[in-house]
Image: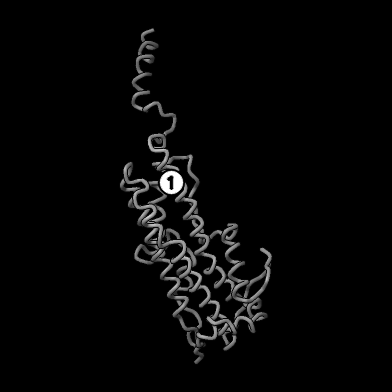
Amino acid sequence: MNKKILMLCMLPVSLLILNCNTYIYPQYEKNPIASTQLIKFDLTMSYNNSKIWAPIRIFELSKQNMPVDVEGLKIKSCVSQWAGIFLEETIANDLMHLESEYKNTYKSTDPDLNKAILEYIVTLIDFTNFAAEKFKNSEYTTETPTHQWESEILMVNENDSQESITGKLHYAITRYGYLRNVNVGPTGSTLRYYSDDMTQPILLHHMKDLAKKITGQKSLKDTDNVDYYFYQANKEYLFNTDLCKNKSVLNK
């Protein structure tokens, strides 16, 4: 009997401590508006990540079966230019406004999370700027047909050096993901690394759109092969685009 009385006495105290919250993470209930904004931020960044990796994947696929000759390097240079322009437009249209938009999203509840949000945005912009500049300014020659950065930007994971551009992005995503999950809890969507996921509809959508712009094709299927031979078959259109005509390819 004494045990039952003790349990009954503990119940109102427990409810008071939990603030009548049935969630493990009470901040979700205390600040539902901010949590909704946080989930919106997740969706926005998911879209942006998929869009950023579209030109990176297009460029990588275009190198498959590519011969290291004058024509092969010219096609590689053209696709590289298109990838760089696509990323520059993504920065201007999708990324630059994010810092001001999410500056105070969760600041009142968890300043560390708000800081992680801003660091994630800034680091993603830095990564995208890095990739865009490499795509636009690199020269591909018979002596140097590939560059180290081409493989560096392909993946973002725990194996990257913390000092590298991809390592910094991995740390920013990981830290944000941890703090976000602590604050929002299991009701939020799971973060993913879009650099190694080829099945995302948004990623495929932007890959197809970019491939069509580069080659002048009217339509593409998800199953169409966009390797070197695809661009070689459409080289007349590709070589006559303004981006390719304005870019000289050095072959030594």
**Relative to residue 208, is residue 192 depicted above or below?**
above
Q: Amino acid at mark 1?
A: Gln
Residue sitting at 38 percent across and 66 percent down?
Answer: 126
Rendered image coloring scheme = one colour
Residue sitting at 68 percent across and 65 percent down?
Answer: 221
Q: Which of the 4 image quadrants contains residue 76?
A: bottom right
Q: Nearer the viewer, residue 23 or 206?
A: 206
| Image position, residue 237 (x, y; %) | 63, 81
Under tag 1, what secondary structure? helix
Q: Residue furthest bottom?
A: 252
| Image position, residue 57 (x, y; %) | 55, 68
Q: Nearer the viewer, residue 69 or 15?
A: 15
| Image position, residue 101 (x, y; %) | 39, 54
Horizontal arrangement in the rendering, residue 140 relative to residue 16 (left or right): right
Q: Residue furthest top?
A: 1
Horizontal arrangement in the rendering, residue 235 relative to residue 158 (left or right): right
Horizontal arrangement in the rendering, residue 145 relative to residue 164 (left or right): right
Q: Quadrant of the N terminus?
A: top left
How packed mark 1 is, by other alpha carbons closer than 10 Å (few <14, some 14-19, many 20 or more), is some
Numbered circles on residues, count: 1
| Image position, residue 128 (x, y; %) | 43, 67
**Relative to residue 31, is residue 111 depicted above or below?**
below
Q: Which of the 4 image quadrants contains residue 227?
A: bottom right
Residue sitting at 51 percent across and 70 percent down?
Answer: 86
Residue, disc 1? 37
